[in-house]
Each structure stands twice: as structure tokens, then as C-alpha cells.
Amino acid sequence: MLDVRGLRKVYEGAGRHVEAVRDLTFTVEAGELVCLVGPSGCGKTTLLKCVGGLLEPTGGEVYLAGRKVDGPPPGMAFVFQEYGRSLFPWMRVGQNVGLPLKRKGFDKGRRRALVADALASVGLADAAGAYPWQLSGGMQQRVAIARALAYEPEVLLMDEPFAAVDAQTRADLEDLVRRLWRERGITVLFVTHDIDEAVYLGERVVVLSASPTVVREQLKVDLPAERDQLSTRVAPRFAELRTHVYEQIQAAKRGAVTAGTDKPPPH
Amino acid sequence: MRGGNAALGAAGFAAFLLLAEAVPRLGLVGEEYFPPASRIADALGTELADGAFWTALGDTLTGWAAGLAIAVVAGIVIGVLLSVVPYLREATASTIEFLRPIPSVALIPLAVLLYGTELGSVLLLVVYASFWQVLIQVLYGVQDVDPVAEETARSYGLGTWARVRHVLWPTALPYVMTGVRLAAAVALILAITAELVIGAPGLGARIAVAQTSQAVPEMYALIVVAGVLGLLINVGARSVERRALAWHQSVRGEVAV
């Protein structure tokens, strides 16, 4: 579904030459939920913006369903970390969610149905008439997720979406993403710096190195599909996986080089 | 608290009127140049009963409104164009910085040459003065676009025109409103100046006539009318601003989350 091949991004400034992403190759299968995790400042956001067609890569290609990405593709929706700035304060919640649908050429009835359905899925069925700034932070991010859902994307890109909300809200939103992913069968690429979050959410975790970024390891998360904030997080397998990812990230920070493996840690 | 402020304001204004009445009557200033407030009020009553006064008021408001409308539309269109077309902003920055400080009144000779005492003279001065107020605010407002909002719009495939309409314009609107409010005040000043100096028909020309014919209380009455006009324009502009920007932080105040 999503195919990233040899992606490279160099920022050229006044006499400065910063190689943010060196060489990234990975794929995301249709209907998969993949978490990208890496040390702080490893170019996760740069990578995601290249994948979403918001930034032009210096080298390499991104393919969405076999078609090369050169600009934001219609089958992709983006959820940003800064929900407060990503939602438009001059539009009500319903208008915010409905705006991207105008481009798709849907008539008014269809748009209204999609907006109502998306808001209901995130538990905000009666918030359509409110302004985003009248809602709490967690609710605002739900609105941003609803906007992405209404757009009916094939691939959902999420850039550290829960980094700015409190821990309780965060747990609720994680379960929301898992539920929506299972209900709707969307492909999700979820970027986070939170190791626990990556292991809890993902079917697969891609561990990135420090900048200049390469893929350090790809790890299959063999936890049951039905996950729960209480039981999953105390499961021995969860602890093993998170410890393994944690060690990888620590090693990445020190700059240790190990060959990338697809092998999960032994039971 | 609000009621208390209003009462204080009314009391202060009453005291000011009392002073304006008492000082000339006590002979502290020459009554021939500074008539007491009651005589100015009398003269104002006479003016209000005179049809020629209302014609003059209409002329002034026509020059003000037409000039302001032209300046606002031109300021917005040119401001957005300069910001949207690449390199245009940089290419025009120095020219704008050169033209902007030229006082509009310095163009009076040009206005007389071109239009004599016609409405065109008033419009030229009004448009020149208020255009810059709007343009500068639009240029600042457009720069204020949040990169995250812009990227959101791009990621959902909104084209240039849709981004101008749904992101750039609402972002710039608070600035535009400030520009329009400033321009409305400046436009009134320039309209009355043009009438006063050039003699184009309007309140300003009527003030000049009152002055040359030694009708001092009438002159003050007309000045009071000009002041009230300025006040009403400011109050009107603010209420429009409040309505258009109900969503904006400066208007909505703190909300419970």
C-alpha cells in the first residue's frame, strides 16, 4: 500500500547542510497499523511530511498504492500534533470536518452525512456547532481525527498526535485509534517518540536511528489484537517488547550500529 | 462596574460643558473667539434646521464613503496579490516604503490641477491617505498565516484559491479590520481637510465660509458635528469588527474549557 524507497532529505541553508534523513526504506501493507519510533530529533516529522507529499524529498521515492507521491495525494489524510493550530478557529467543528470534502465534489447531503458519521465515531456527535476553542485539548484532537476519517483516506498519517494531551486523555485516544483502525480497515502510519505507545498501538514497530536517519529495526508486535490499557500493559510480552525497543533506542542515541533485523526478541 | 464607568463618563462630560460655558462668561478668554457652550448649541440648532447644512453633510459623507470603499477594496486586492505572487512583495517593498510617508495634504496642488473643486479632489486625497492604512495591515495579516494551518490545508488538497479563501483571508481579517478602522478615521480627516482647503462642497467648505464671515458660534457648531461624525464612525467600525471577529481571541475573551 505504502512503499518508501531510499528516502533521503537534506536541508540546504545559508552555508549549512543538514542531512535529516539519510536512507529510509520500508513498506506498510494495506490495513496495517505501523508505528515509527525513534530518538528525539531523528527526523520523524520530516519523514512523515515527505511521505505525505508536503515536503519534497532530496532522494528516493514514496509510492501510494503503486503511484508516486509528488504532492499531497487524495488518498491520504494527515493528523498533526498541534491540533489547536491545525483546526481553524474561525470555523465551527462541523465546518472544519467538512471543508476537505468540498474538494472531493460531494453534494451537500453526502458531506453532511460523512461529517455526522465521522463525529459520531470519535464520540463528538453533538459538537458540530461548537467552535474548536470551546473544546478541551483531547476533544480538539478528536475533531482533527474526525476530519481525517470523513475524508475517507486509504492511508492515515499521524504525527505525534497525542504528545500534547494529558496522560488519561492520551490513553483514551490510543484506544480510539485502535478501535477506528479495526472498524474501518484504514492503513495507519503513526509516528511517536513514546516507546510504550508504539508497542501498545502498533502491529509492527519501525525503530529509527538517530539523525541522519536510517531504519534500525523492524519489529512485529505479537500481542493479541484485542488490547486493553490495563491487561496489555502489564502483560509479560508487552514488557519484553518495550524493553527491547527501549534498548534499541538507547543504542541508537549512542550511535551504536547493529544490523537491522526483522526478528522479534525471543520469548 | 460598567454602569459606574458610564456614570463617571457622563459626569466628566457635564463638567467639561460647564467649564466651556463658564470660562468665556467669566471673561477668562475672549468671547468673540470662544463663545460659551450654550451659544454654540444654539448655533448648532440653527444649522440642523438649515437644508444647506444637510446637503453639506451628505457631500462630506459621500466623499468619505466612496474614498474609503475604493481604498479598502484596492488595499485588500493589492495586498493579497503582493503576498500571493512570489517575489512581488520583495520587489515592491522599497517603493511602498517611499510612497507611504508622503503626506496626503502634499497632494493638494495636484488634486486642484486635476479636478479643481470637484468631488475628484476629495477622493484623491482620501484614497491616497487611507489606502496605505489598509495595505500595510493586509501585508502584515497575510504574513501571520500559521504554517500548521497552511500545511493542513495543503495536505487535504485545497488549491491556491481555496487556501486564500479559507486560511489566508480569515487569518488576515483581524488585521484588515484594524486597517479599515484606521482608514475610516483618516478618510474623514482628509475629506474635511480637502473641503476646507480646496473648497470642494461639504462640511469643511461650510466651516471655511463660517470663519470668513465671522460666524464664530456656527464655525464651532460645525466642528462639533465633525467630531460627532468621527465618534460615530469609530463606534460603527468597532461594532462591525466585533461581529466579524466573534471567533477571534481578542473578541471572544476567555472561555471555560
Image (tube, helix red, strand yellow):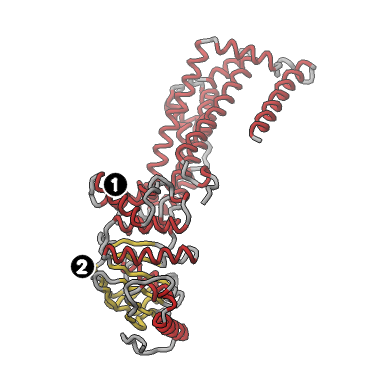
Relative to A205, is B68 on the left or the right? right
Q: Earlier in the sequence, mark 2 or mark 1?
A: 2
Q: Is residue B24 visible?
A: yes
Of residues A184 and A106, the one nearer the viewer is A184
The chain ID associated with circle 1 is A
Determine whether B206 is above or below A10 in the image. above
Where in the figure is residue A48, as x and y percent of width and height? 35, 69
Quadrant in the picture for the N terminus of chain B: top right
What chain is tagged by disc 2? A
Q: Nearer the viewer, residue B234 or B9?
A: B9
Which residue does the image show at 47% across and 19% down from the upper left? B58
In the image, is A22 to the left or to the right of B178?
Answer: left
Q: Position of residue A211 (x, y in %)?
A: 42, 79
Numbered disc 2: secondary structure:
strand
B166 on left or right of B18: left
**Which quarter of the figure has residue B189?**
top right
User: Crowdedness of circle 1 by 10 Å Cα count: few (<14), some, many (20+)?
Assistant: some
Q: Are marks 2 and 1 on the same chain?
A: yes
> What amino acid is labelled 1 in the image?
Arg
Q: Relative to B52, say whether A176 is above or below.
A: below
Q: Which residue is at the front of the view, A139 or A20?
A: A139
Label placed on residue A77: none
The disc label shown at residue A112, or none: 1
Which sits in the foreground, B70 or B205? B70
Q: Marks 2/1: CA distance? A: 30 Å
Q: Amino acid at mark 2?
A: Arg
Instruction: Tell me if mark 2 has few (under 14), some (14-19) or many (20+) residues whose alpha carbon lies within 10 angstroms of its own.
Output: few
Residue sitting at 70 percent across and 19 percent down? B34
Q: Secondary structure at mark 1?
A: helix
Query: Is residue A209 among the parts visible in the rendering?
Result: no
Report the residue marked by disc 2: A67
